Image (spheres, rainbow, N blue to C red):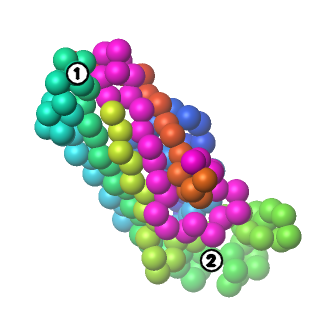
Amino acid sequence: MDILKANQTYVFKTEEYNMIDFIEFVGDEYISLNAAHFFEGFLLNRIPIIKKAKLRNIVTFKAAWGSISNRNNPNLNPSLIQFPVGENDRPTTRALSSRPYMEASVGVSNIFKFVRVDLVQRLSYLDNPVLQNFLGRNGLGIRFQVAVDF
């Protein structure tokens, strides 16, 4: 059994899912995708004031798709450790199902030469009642990263 790596801070982490809770998704067989495209000024260099600041635009997409086999599923085998539940006996941990978990972000880097800011949107499993709510949208969050960018 494996737990998808979650990030519940305001720091953008490239190797983790930035919009899921800890132990929200588990699976014993899954595949994940982590793609990032760095525009290297292709879009922002068209605006003279921004070109002088040398800001860079980044788009990322992350997805995970998988399941839990019957022998590891606690819903089918009561002798296994059961998934934790929250308010109203609603499970806080669930298996990846027939649809993938997905999130995407748009970011700007090289702010003051070392700051990156990303707007991250959760694209699936929006039924979680404790999703972040930024700008009135469920599953939308803002993340920051400090890194030297040349």
The secondary element bearing badge 2 is classed as loop
Sequence-earlier tag: 1 or 2: 1
User: Front-most of 106 and 5?
Assistant: 106
The secondary element bearing badge 1 is classed as helix
Q: Which image quarter: residue 76?
A: bottom right
- Is residue 126 part of the magenta span, yes or no? yes
Q: Amino acid at mark 2?
A: Asn
Q: Is residue 39 left or right of residue 108?
A: left
At x 45%, y 48%, the residue is: 120
At x 83%, y 71%, the residue is: 89
Residue 6 appears in the figure: no
Q: Residues within 10 Å of mark 1 (few under 14, many from 20)?
A: few
- Is residue 91 part of the magenta span, yes or no? no
User: Residue 42: horizontal and vertical position, in percent?
Assistant: 14, 37
How far apart are labels 1 and 2 at the CA level? 56 Å
Tell me whether the residue at label 1 lies in contact with that at label 2, contact meaning CB atoms closer than 8 angstroms.
no
Rendered view: 58 above or below 113? below
Residue furthest to the top in view is: 112
Q: Amino acid at mark 1?
A: Ile
At x 22%, y 21%, the residue is: 49
Q: Which residue is mark 2?
A: 73
The tag on residue 49 is 1
